[in-house]
Amino acid sequence: MRLGIIGAGHVGGALGRLFEAQGHDVRFGVRDPDKQAAGGLPRNRSGFVADAAAFGDVIVLAIPWVAVKEALATTGPLTGKTVIDCVNPLLPDLSGLALGTTTSAGEEIAKLLPGAKVVKCFNTLGAANFANPDFGDQKASMLFAGDDAGAKLTVAELGNQLGFDMIDAGPLSQSRWLEAMAMLWITMAYKYGGSERSAFKLLR
């Protein structure tokens, strides 16, 4: 599968490396490819945001919330493509969410990308867990939400390849609660005595 990763930070970088290890063809899209290359990102696998957006059959959006509108203005049409939205609408000081209860980053991104198949995923725990979602004999649950059944199947398969217990949380509006889960994870991991080596598990 051809994956265009918009963003090469903790989340985008980790997912790109892991998907490559699964045999997928990955290209990164960043604001400044030369700067990223100087930081170690292979230049032959990176370019501008528009390059990654054009390359990928599936697009992974892994950038800060404040950068979303500017980045998506440069992607060109993404009609028909699956867009995996990993974005949490964090306030700049990480004290809370900029959106919640009546909308979500996932829903707002879908408005900016008419025709794309947006699926919220890979946002509810830290990237440190992506390479190893096993906790003893349990797999970390990875919840996802979206309105297109086919796109959700694609995302579920990608998550299964990484070893997650993939859980369909329902339509894209469920992003409101997945983003709140992310805020819970962040505050527990970094503020209230928890650990970034932690994850949620849905028991059923």
Image (spheres, rainbow, N blue to C red):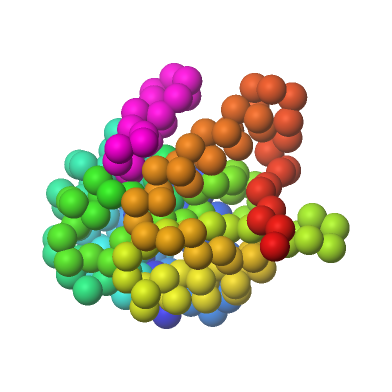
Residue 68: x, y in percent? 27, 43
Q: Is residue 159 magenta?
A: no
Residue 114's image quarter? bottom left
**Residue range highlighted in magenta:** 89-105
Residue ID at (66%, 48%): 200
Residue 196: x, y in percent? 68, 38
Residue 81 lies, with reference to residue 15, above or below; the image says below
Residue 134's image quarter? bottom right
Residue 34: x, y in percent? 34, 48
Q: Is residue 103 magenta?
A: yes
**Which of the two residues, 32 or 106, is positioned nearer the viewer here?**
106
**Which of the two residues, 8 or 58, is positioned nearer the viewer here?**
58
Residue 153: x, y in percent? 45, 76
**Which of the two residues, 129 or 100, is positioned nearer the viewer here?**
100
The answer to whether residue 133 of the structure is visible from this angle is no
Residue ID at (34%, 28%): 98
Q: Residue furthest right?
A: 136
